Image: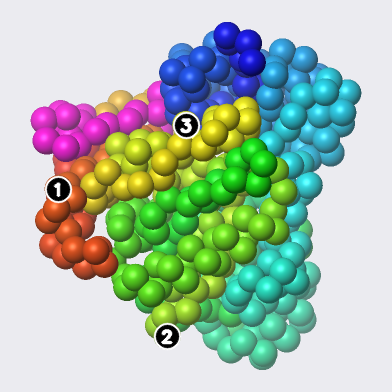
């Protein structure tokens, strides 16, 4: 291993930024490929190549300059990544074949089902007739998901009655998949990781709070039973076993009202629900991803203390230069840590940053049902209310 290695990252958004921040202490420099000049990762990465995520010339330049290649967005081209892996003899992780599977929600669901991993009932949908047949099978409401291109809740459209069907189909371009609407107790996630030589690890179960299909807060440990947390970890391990390639995987799950665990979606990269690990865990998900894709030993995933992370989302009704106020309240609060993403424009529901609030580990009982997580969640919401975008 040389003194300094280079990790090439397809994507230079906030995940690329936090990957670069985590890579530096490990002696790893980062070069990112991103279409936005002065992207969020550019101030902390060694260099940025300006180009689309699937730009052949840009990806080839990235591979030529890197010892390892990864991606922080599913819009990367798996065929191109596989080609440069062979041509430049540079490891690409997670495996491009895994990316190909996850890019298509129908293919993802079929792969999970075939591997015996529990998922909601689903059907392929291409037109109104097929949608009506799916509704006849599942009943209202249902969740319509674009097969490709959706992320951060985009491309997911709930349908509650026949009058919404045509608009829902118009909202998802190309093919779609319909899933039965899960009567869930809570949405949870496991940040899992695959390392070298078959090594795997998982962070503690997080509880995710969504509104308008966008993640607002993650509470760790999840406010559920140890039995459910253990079952979630077992399902996450089964997911890791079916995927190929090193790296961090965000595994989103439903805890049903009967205490069962179903896989919702998988991200082959660090995930928004794992941001709490920067302050809340012994190793952050970003350091863990860098360790994994560069073949280093994995770090410990133990929780330092109960933690809540909260997203800072753009408001208003139009795109405009980013200008905010109220972050002093977060900076003054003991146990709170702020992360701005360096985005130059704000628009409704755009992720502009996040912050975490950590608590006292000894105050919380083993199940996560004690008072600390509730108090931290209330505190996080109060602090976020102080932040405004002009």
Cα–Cα gap, marks 1 and 3: 24 Å
Q: Which residues are magenta?
A: 325-346
Between circles 2 and 1, the one closer to the viewer is 1
In the shown orientation, is residue 380 left or right of residue 126? Answer: left
Foreground of the two, 347 or 330: 330
Magenta stretch holds residue 330:
yes
Look at the picture and state if 145 lies above or below 191. below
Q: Give the label on residue 258, or none.
A: 2
Q: Quadrant of the N terminus?
A: top right
Residue 104 placement (x, y as % from top left):
73, 56
Element carrying mark 1: loop
Q: Residue 187 lies in what quarter of the image?
A: bottom left
Cα–Cα gap, marks 2 and 1: 31 Å
Look at the picture and state if 88 lies above or below 368. above
Residue 215 placement (x, y as % from top left):
40, 53
Q: Earlier in the sequence, mark 3 or mark 2?
A: 2
Q: Residue 331 lies in what quarter of the image?
A: top left
Look at the picture and state if 296 lies above or below 248. above
Residue beneath disc 1: 360
Residue in the picture at 11% in, 35% down:
334
Element carrying mark 3: helix
From this viewpoint, is residue 298 visible?
Answer: yes
Foreground of the two, 281 or 216: 281
Discs 3, 2 touching: Cβ within 8 Å: no
In the shown orientation, is residue 96 left or right of residue 35? Answer: right
Residue beneath disc 3: 287
Q: Quadrant of the C terminus?
A: top left
Residue in the picture at 77% in, 81% down:
129
């Amino acid at each position: 291993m040389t003194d300094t290695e280079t990790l090439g990252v397809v994507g230079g958004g906030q995940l690329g930024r936090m990957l670069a921040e985590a890579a530096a202490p490990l002696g790893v420099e980062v070069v990112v490929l991103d279409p936005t000049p002065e992207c969020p990762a550019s101030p902390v990465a060694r260099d940025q190549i300006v180009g689309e995520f699937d730009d052949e010339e840009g990806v080839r330049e990235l591979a030529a300059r890197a010892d390892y290649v990864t991606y922080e967005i599913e819009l990367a081209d798996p065929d191109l990544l596989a080609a440069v892996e062979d041509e430049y003899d540079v490891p690409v992780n997670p495996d491009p074949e895994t990316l190909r599977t996850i890019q298509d929600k129908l293919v993802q669901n079929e792969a999970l089902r075939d591997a015996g991993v529990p998922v909601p009932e689903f059907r392929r949908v291409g037109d109104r007739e097929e949608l009506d047949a799916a509704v006849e099978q599942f009943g209202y409401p249902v969740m319509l998901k674009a097969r490709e291109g959706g992320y951060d809740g985009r491309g997911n459209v709930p349908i509650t009655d026949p009058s919404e069907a045509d608009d829902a189909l118009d909202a998802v371009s190309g093919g779609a998949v319909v899933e039965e609407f899960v009567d869930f107790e809570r949405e949870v996630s496991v940040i899992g990781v695959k390392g070298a030589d078959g090594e795997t690890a998982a962070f503690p179960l997080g509880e995710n709070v969504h509104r308008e299909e966008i993640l607002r807060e993650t509470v760790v440990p999840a406010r559920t039973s140890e039995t459910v947390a253990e079952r979630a970890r077992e399902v996450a391990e089964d997911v890791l076993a079916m995927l190929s390639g090193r790296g961090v995987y965000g595994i989103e799950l439903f805890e049903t009202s009967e205490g069962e665990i179903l896989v919702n979606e998988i991200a082959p990269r660090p995930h928004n629900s794992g941001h709490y690990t920067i302050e809340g865990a012994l190793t952050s998900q970003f350091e863990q991803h860098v360790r994994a894709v560069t073949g280093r030993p994995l770090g410990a995933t133990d929780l330092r203390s109960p933690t809540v992370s909260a997203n800072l989302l753009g408001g208003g009704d139009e795109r405009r230069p980013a200008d905010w106020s109220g972050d002093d309240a977060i900076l003054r609060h003991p146990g709170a840590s702020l992360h701005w993403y360096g985005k130059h424009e704000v628009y409704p529901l755009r992720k502009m940053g996040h912050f975490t609030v950590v608590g006292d580990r000894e105050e919380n009982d083993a199940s996560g049902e004690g008072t600390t997580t509730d108090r931290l969640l209330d505190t996080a919401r109060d602090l976020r209310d102080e932040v405004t975008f002009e």
